[in-house]
Image (cartoon, rainbow, N blue to C red):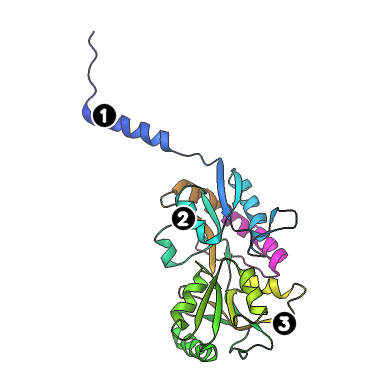
Amino acid sequence: MKNRKLPAVLFGAIAFLTSFAAGAKDWTHVKVGIEGAFPPWNLTDSSGKLAGFDVDLINDLCKRAKADCELIAGDWNAMIPSLNAEKFDLVMTLGINEKRKQVVDFTVPYASGVASFLLLKDGPVSPLPMAGERLNLNDKSKADPVMAAIGEALKGKTVGVVQSTSQEQLINAYFGSDVTVRAYKNSGERDLDLKAGRIDAGFDSGVYETSVLGKPGNDDLMMSGPLVKGAMLATEVALGMRKGETDLKAKFDDAIRQAAKDGTIRQLSEKWSKIDLTPTFDAP
């Protein structure tokens, strides 16, 4: 009996399925990029181990997702390039904004935060308006006059931000023509310059700033101005991943929703920041 040739369409379908199966990932081992220098979100302790809210949470999420997760520390400004170069599969503490959506996908948020200004108590910048009050920049009728007043207070001053963050984008967008924007590798380096008087203000995560103010030796610092979200700010914090990794997204979306529902995110965020960072999101 002669062998029959497979029809071209059937052969193509088999080749496609074989290729798909070879390329499919079961996501039992997941590499997670984390900065390790942004307390209380993440930090490196005195023994060199990673710690913080992100670390406790990702360990919990990986158990729920039935994944063995490997945490890899790296510089913040290299996180997205390293993700897309497949050094990582996920990136922690990645705030969601439109610019980032162009190059990576996100899980649902695992935390909801704000941003605010950090000043020297006796420094050159006067206390800013709406101190400690929440302000959504998307409510332009309310937010624009406040941001204009802040711009006047900061005019001619130097504002420190962490490079490649949405906080850097915001300061440039709102005040870039009137202030000098100085970008730093991490928040700690910026804070040293603020305390030394080499810059006049900082702008960063409100959760981070709350943590800094609770540490010894920072009595000369204060948060000032509104607790801001909206516009290009990435205050909804998620796990970032490469485009098209739908199975990985589904696993960790489900894990995050479970952790929010059973109170784990509230418990861990209050442990590290004294603030409940539990996100809100639409039902799946």
- Tell me which residue sits at (70%, 64%) in the image: 272
User: From what the image shows, is residue 3 above or below residue 106?
Assistant: above
Residue found 51% across the figure and 47% down from its top: 87
* Side of 21 where 276 appears, left or right: right
Instruction: Give the labeled residue for mark 1.
Output: 10
Q: Amino acid at mark 2?
A: Pro
Left or right of 8 in this view: 90: right
**Does the magenta portion include 144?**
no
- Residue 269 lies in the magenta-colored region: yes
Number of other residues with Cα within 10 Å of mark 2, as a class: few under 14, some 14 to 19, many 20 or more: few
At which x and y percent is residue 209?
Answer: 65, 74
Q: Position of residue 13 (x, y in %)?
A: 29, 32
Nearest to the eye among marks 1 and 3: give it: 3
3D distance between C-alphas at marks 2 and 3: 37 Å
Vertical side of 246 occupied by 150: above or below: below
Label 3: which residue? 220
Q: Amino acid at mark 1?
A: Leu
Relative depth, front residue between 243 and 34: 34
